[in-house]
Image (cartoon, helix red, strand yellow):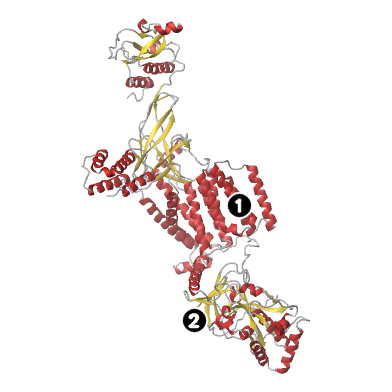
Amino acid sequence: MAQPLKNSALNGAFKWLFQWRGPERGTIVLVQRRVFILPTRQGLLYAGVILLMLTGSVNYDLSLGFILAFLLGAAGIQTMLHTFRNLAHLRISAGRVQPVFAGETAQFQLQIHNNTRADRFSIGVTGNQITADYIDVPADNTVMAQVPVTAGQRGWLRPGRMTLFTRFPVGLFRAWSYAEPDVRCLVYPAPATPGLPLPAVVAGDGEGGMAGQGHDEFSGLRPYRPGDSPRHIAWKAVARDDTLLTKQFAGRADAELWLAWDVLPPTLNTEQRLSHLTRWVIEADALGMAYGLRLPGTTLSLSSGPTHRNDCLHALALHGTTADLA
Amino acid sequence: MAQRPISLNSRPIIAREAYGLAVGFLLASAAHLLRLPLWLGALIGVIVFWRIYLAHRKLPTPGKWLLGLLAFAAAAGIMIEYRTLLGRDAGVALLVVMLALKVLETRTLRDGILLGFLGFFLLVTNFLFSQTITTALYMLGCAWLLIVVLIGMQFTGTWPGWRQPARRTTVLLLQALPLMLVLFLLFPRIQGPLWGLPHDSHAGLSGLSDNMSPGSLNSLILSDAVAFRAEFRDRIPEARALYWRGPVLWDYDGRTWTAARFVFNANELPAGEPSIEYTVTLEPHNKRWLFALEMPMQRPPRSVATRDMQLLSTTPVRSRMRYNMSSQLEAAYGADDSETVLQRALQLPDGFNPRTLQHARELRRKFNDDRQLVAAVLNDFRNQNFVYTLSPPLLGEHAVDEFLFDTRRGFCEHYASAFTVLMRAAGIPARVVTGYQGGQVNPVSDYILIRQADAHAWNEIWISGTGWIRVDPTAAVSPARVERGIASALPRSDALPMFVRGDFAFLQRMRLTWDSVTYTWNQWVLGYNPERQRQFLANIGFSDATWQKLAVLLFVLAGLAVLAGALLAFRDLRRSRNDAVRAAYERFCRKLARRGLPRHPAEGPVVYARRAAQWRPDTAQEITTITENYVALRYGNSATPQAVRQFQRSVSRFAS
């Protein structure tokens, strides 16, 4: 409905009319000035049917026909108030949003709070004007609505202007309101497929001196790569089917894995590099290894665990972007 | 909740909605179904139940070809049955069957909504046949149901049950009432019709006609339908003075009396002081006669008075009509009628009723004076075992002869007919007057109710120097007929409509009360036409307002009516002081406090519940459930309106 318009004068008019004011912080209250209402196609059809009833009543002199037509017409007008009321005075605030990889869909959460005495039914929330999440918000309640937005590229993703709309109760009118909460979703680079093998692990106690958990739990096998410690080769497996496999241990502190910008082939461009690094971070994290990330201008020292993973992905997502480094 | 399209118009309707639409359609067309031919009613029933079955079994609706075939077959059947597809009856039959097919076809929300709207239109077509209070209430109920179904289709979340849309509909209609009233009173009315009415649009209206043959009045007398009502300004005259004049019949072919085909326009009505003033509310009868007490002293608007004192509306009376009237009960008129007119009142068909003609000649020889002759004939009627009955024996070719000399059993049309033939044969100009006699006084509202059962036929004879005077031979045979009405005049074995006889006093009284309600309804609801609207506007001080003024008035009042609705609607938008769940929970805490276990100021609900459960193990289960629900509703996302209400109910049920 609200496509950006090229004509700036018209855009200005729309901005004024629909109160487009860019991202808003905190709770957005759908005050009456922000709720718009127009008849739907079915509303026009309804008006047509009533007009037909009136014409018939004039022609055949049906007093009761007049009464029924006027009653239905008046009820139709009252539904306008009901539809309007169904949307007005809702309070919108943005909920948490989980980071996603580029190409995935970010699930923005809108927290819709109804602190009035009227139950609200069948409210649609949409970000793309194609699909919507429909919710009921009883009086004095808060309900979450999902607004999925496809993440195109890494960096910060804003959901843009969202539309809340409703046709309740009869569908003769559609009330809508715009809300653009100040919320953003971090989009990690898309992991490369297929990825390059992880770089070689530097054996020995880490130069990063991180506090590992020692040689604790065996977590799986992976193909041998040059540089793996012979102590970790699964000799039993070698004896069984002649392939070299390296045993992996969760929380190994002595395996130092550096995921570095410059170990990647020079033919790759920035985005491809970020993409490969992302995959490496995911893999390394899945293996439970300690790893560090070295990007031009940024280095994250050896570590492991979800926080570290998220820090690394965060750095990759925002690499080279000037805005919103925080 | 999963993402769904931004417009749900194409979503399939579900079983519950299909049931609602099918039932709504059936109820909205129920009155039509009773009027339709049996095969059509059965077809429509089958189609609708087919849809219900499909919805129940979650089967797809039939394809276009089958529907097209059914539509064609139904239209062809209607064409054969009614010989047309146009006109009121055939048109309604077609509409109902096409809507039934639409019910069958309804697949998506868009179809469902359209069907609901068409259902409203279907309701209006019912008013072509009946506009009684009962019909109005029934159709209002149907409209309510259709709106409930329409609202029911708009719920996208958990289905809250039919009660929710039902309540919403009731609120909506109540809010619509003031605006409806404003529109009804002030919306500019145009006198219809805008286009030609179908020829059958007034079929089924009963009343007197322009001819009288044996048995024609009889069928009217068996009907207790209302012919008209009259409200008298001062007093209601005695029953035997109430001769409501209708068609005047001149020509006789030996069997049937017919009205004169020429119109005698008489612009002057009898002069003098009217003895009685009243207002008649005439039911539509699709004929031109306007009934008035003999003799009318004035003409209603848009009508003519003929020389033989019939009041004729310029167009057939097709809607209820109200007119003021005044009459002079004892007036005679037409003393100066021309020879041509009088000749016509002496015509008799050749070769009929020889015995009667012979008898008339004998009478003429005996009595030179017309009045004496009339008195003698009436005396014969009175004394020679004539019987007033609604079930006379069948009469042959010489009907008057057989009646006068053999059977001597008959009712008003026999007496009027025989009397006229006798008079004409004796050379006294005479004619038959049909109309209504008497009427039932409604003590509830003080008006008089004239039913078709009060139909009557009497005579007028022309006396030189006086003019036309009324003679009612039936009164001679059965004085009770004119004094106390038809029910008291007939033997109890004669069939009469239940309420025409005075039995069942209580029912009679109820019936009269109901009729007076109907009368008011007719006056103020059905009779609200452009003319009444002008009167109403004049009464509120807009006697000759320009349309601009009226438009302003309409918009201001309509605006106020909408505003009133808005104030009611937006009352719910006030910020609530007490969250419903919290309020219910506080109520629960107070109940526990009254038992002696108040909640500590800083105590969380769960801890409090644990303490309460230990303290009263007998209700531990209830306390735990309520608290769990409270926590879920207040801090979770599970709160639907019905969950909240359920919680409130569970708190109410919790015994303190």
- Is B96 rendered above or below residue A203? below
How far apart are labels 2 and 1 at the CA level? 54 Å
Mark closer to the chain start, 2 or 1: 1
Return the residue at label 2.
Answer: B235
Q: Where is residue B482 in the image (x, y as percent from the top left)?
A: 58, 82
Q: Nearer the viewer, mark 2 or mark 1?
A: 1
Q: Is residue B203 left or right of residue B557?
A: right
- What residue is drawn where x is 64% and y is 61%? B198
Q: In this view, does A276 lie to the left or right of B380?
A: left
Return the residue at label 1.
Answer: B44
Looking at the rendered image, the quarter that the C terminus of chain A falls into is: top left
Q: What residue type is labelled 1?
A: Ile
- Dividing the picture into quadrants, the one containing residue B210 is bottom right
Q: Is mark 2 on a helix, strand or loop?
A: loop
Q: Which chain carries label 1?
A: B
Q: What residue type is labelled 2?
A: Arg
From where the camera sits, is residue B295 visible?
no
From where the camera sits, is residue B627 visible?
yes
Q: Where is residue A12 in the image (x, y as percent from the top left)?
A: 43, 38
Q: Is mark 1 on a helix, strand or loop?
A: helix
- Is B548 rendered above or below residue B233? above
Q: Position of residue A203 (x, y in %)?
A: 33, 7
- Neighbours of disc 1 within 10 Å: few (<14), some (14-19), many (20+): many
Task: Give the camera-side residue of A223 and B435.
Answer: A223
Q: Mark 2 lies on which chain?
A: B
